[in-house]
Amino acid sequence: MPMGIEPPASAASSEAATVSDDDTMQQTAATGRTEMRPVKYHYADSFWCTYLVSVFAASIAETVTYPLDLTKTRLQIQGEAAATTVDAEGAVKKLKYRGMFATATGIIREEGALKLWQGITPALYRHLVYSGVRIVTYDALRKKLRNGKEHFSIWQSALSGVGAGALAQWLASPADLVKVHVQMEGKRRALGLEPRVHSAAHAFREIVSRGGVFGLWKGSVPNVQRAALVNLGDLTTYDTVKHFIMLKTGLPDCHLVHIMSSICAGLVAATMGTPADVVKTRIMNQPTDASGKGLLYKGSIDCLQQTIGKEGFFALYKGFLPVWIRMAPWSLTFWLSFEQIRSSLGASGY
């Protein structure tokens, strides 16, 4: 009997060993699958993390390049009917044309160096909405249109960029309007004119009191048009150029690729967005009557026609140099910060 029992015991031992090996293999496989899961999804790729990272990166870029934005806004106002003053004898005088460098040095000389950052508070408030919405919306549209495919065509990227930019800017238009009002106060005071607003909060209250809640969206049409064009240039160009460079050169997702892509994005965005930016700035800056209705322009089309008719087509590119000079470092700072923060958090490449 003992000899008859030994083989089953041996077989059982062998079977147990086999089962043990299989379990180990299953555990190893399971471990392998578990280790791969964070690669497929990471908290840093989530909606809110992407939103917050984009806002933080935009705030860095805005703070660094804001003096150029202020200079650009002042240049765009020169030459229009609102850019006038009255001397002691009652004669109306237009503001003297100055270039980008002369405008910047004039601000420092006449108003102080810190005035180069006048209006930055509402600008940062704007990015709480604008930059977060545009990035997550573009990302959502990109995933939707791509539908799991590796290839993402230019027209799909362009459609995503336009949609994301338009939605983000429409939501952020009130902060943009407040920013323009605050930016122009230093110039008004330097000319001896009565100040219209004293702070971002005061500007907000004045706009609402004159035009109601909907007055916060004055100039939103050219604003949205500009944002759609800018993001068509920025988001679409960055995304397309980045993946094109990586595909054609074999370079990894590195700082060099980010720099080259962001430089291209800044140039295209400035070229496409400057005309709409000029119209937007002029409509937002124009004086209004007691009901909040503009006194100079009926709308964006009227402003466009008046600008070209009185000052020529290239008036639409007034302030292009500071726009481009600002857009390039802004785009560079934003995308480098955005990609670096995401990489530090363990997110996948954008």
Image (cartoon, helix red, strand yellow):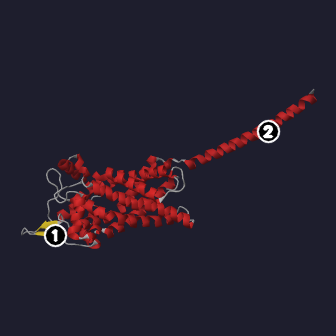
Amino acid on which disc 1 is placed: Lys
Whether residue 78 is visible, yes or no, is no
Q: Is residue 99 above or below residue 38?
A: below
Q: Is residue 22 above or below residue 39?
A: above
- Residue 127 pos. (x, y %): 35, 54
* x 58%, y 46%: residue: 37
Q: Please, what secondary structure does the residue beneath circle 2 have?
A: helix
Q: In the rendered structure, are the residues bearing label 1 and label 2 in contact, judged by CB atoms less than 8 Å apart?
A: no
* x 56%, y 67%: residue: 249
Front in this rendered view, residue 350 or 144:
144
Q: Please, what secondary structure does the residue beneath circle 1 have?
A: strand
Crowd band around label 1 with a 10 angstrom C-alpha radius: few (<14), some (14–19), many (20+): some
* x 53%, y 48%: residue: 42
Reading the image, the residue beneath label 1 is 94
For the N terminus, the image quarter is: top right
Q: Is residue 136 left or right of residue 9?
A: left
- Residue 40 pos. (x, y %): 56, 48
- Residue 8 pos. (x, y %): 86, 31
- Residue 299 pos. (x, y %): 22, 57
Q: Is residue 92 left or right of residue 49?
A: left
Cα–Cα span, label 1 and label 2: 95 Å
The number of discs equals: 2
State the image quarter where residue 57 is shown.
bottom left
* x 16%, y 69%: residue: 94
Reading the image, the residue beneath label 2 is 17
Mark 1 vs 2, N-terminal side: 2
Amino acid on which disc 2 is placed: Ala
Q: Is residue 44 left or right of residue 296?
A: right
Outermost top residue: 1
Front in this rendered view, residue 305 or 141:
305
